Amino acid sequence: MKKYWPLIRRCIYVSVLIIFIVVFAILKNYPDICEAVTRGPSRVYTLVMSKLSNILPISLTELFFILLVVGVGILVVLTIINLVKKKFLIALHRFLEGAMIVLLSISLYDFSCECAYNRKAIPLPYYEGEVERTEHVNIFNYFADDVNACVNSLEFKSNGDVKATLNFDEIVKEVKKAYAIIEGNDYYHSHFGNAKPMASSFIYTEFQITGVTYSPLSEANINVLNTMSNIPLTIAHELAHTKGVMREDDANKLAFYVCLNSDHPFLRYSAYCSYFYQIEGMVTSYYLTDEEKQDLHKIDDAFYKTRSYVYKFWQEHDLLGDIGDFINDLYLKMSGTKEGTSSYQGGTSYEHDPLTSKLIPSLYQKIFFEKYYR
């Protein structure tokens, strides 16, 4: 009987981990519990891990997954070898060890962030007042002038992308500085996870993935082979995850809000490159006459060249895009986001009321309006 105790212990460990995962799968259906876990034990855990992760400048997430794949792979091979040799007890030991590693990884992920997918709505200051059609030109010109100001403050490559004048750590510093706009709101973690460049960026580019946040290590991993104009917004998005904002559409809106209100032209330009079309949608023939359109301020051609470059860049790096989208879509749906990857577009839809000829604004437009009317 004594020789079976190690096996019994392993079975107990596996059973406990399975129970933990099942319990969390049930609890994350209740928003109040999710809010309490995210603001409580999960927040403390990620704070500790962010400090530990900060010890080394390299991506611990990449290192962890390499070790995870290698370690589990070895245990699988040993299990098969022992089964072939009919050493069934040893094979069962190796199998249970592999199961413990995988289940522990899942448990830590569940504990650190899964509940955040079903917490309360993100408290962004959307503008809820009436926006008259006559204001559309003024609003467009306000932001068009700022786009031009950003263009005049930046340097550009011949292909249209922004020329880097800040290194990675300096961009992260500026993004964290811009996050001061939400400081004091207890909805968000008071700490940041660590933003780190990925050595495997070349792989993620072909998957069309710009960043990955691994909550158990409190790390925001950034694909540095992204277009430079999108780097600040990507960093802001991944850091949003480390502050307890896990839903992708919420992380997008928070990143946009933070960058749009930054003092640094590079961050604002990054926000405009992704979402200025929301302002352009206000000055179509639905709302303006040809005469009114003549009052719109002209935007520097450099801006359109940047956006064209971004589009072409991702068209040229689509080797594994469908696979990346499938994996991400599956992960998001398993986390409770029913829309999957389509959730990234959450809050971007705006409509035209055919009876009143008024704009029914999107959440992004309401963020633009909040800054304009502030």
Image: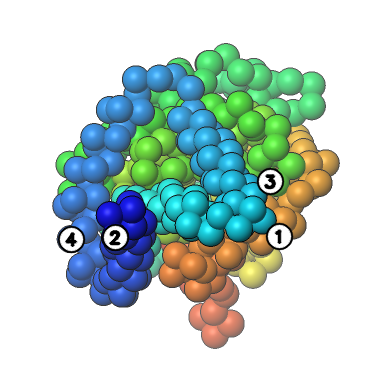
Are the residues at dot 1 and dot 4 in contact (C-beta closer than 8 Å)?
no
Q: Nearer the viewer, mark 1 or mark 4?
A: 4
Horizontal side of 303 relative to 222 (left or right) equals right
- The front one of 154 and 19 is 19
* N-terminal label among 1 and 4: 4
Vertical relation: 370 (above or below) 333:
above
* N-terminal label among 1 and 2: 2
Q: Horizontal and vertical percent for residue 280?
A: 62, 54
Q: Which residue is mark 2?
A: 1
Q: Which element type, helix, strand or loop, lies under badge 2?
A: loop
Q: Which element type, helix, strand or loop, lies under badge 1?
A: helix
Quadrant in the rendering for residue 224 = top right
Q: Horizontal and vertical percent for residue 319?
A: 81, 46
* N-terminal label among 3 and 2: 2
Q: Nearer the viewer, mark 1 or mark 2?
A: 2
Q: Which residue is mark 3?
A: 208
Quadrant in the rendering for residue 199 = top right
Mark 2 residue type? Met
**Residue 265, numbered label:** none
Residue at 74%, 42% (x, y): give it: 206
Q: Which residue is mark 1?
A: 290
Q: Residues within 10 Å of mark 4 (few under 14, many from 20)?
A: some
Q: Quadrant of the N terminus?
A: bottom left
Q: CA distance from mark 1 to mark 2?
A: 89 Å
Q: CA distance from mark 3 to mark 2?
A: 54 Å
* N-terminal label among 4 and 3: 4
**Residue 36, numbered label:** 4
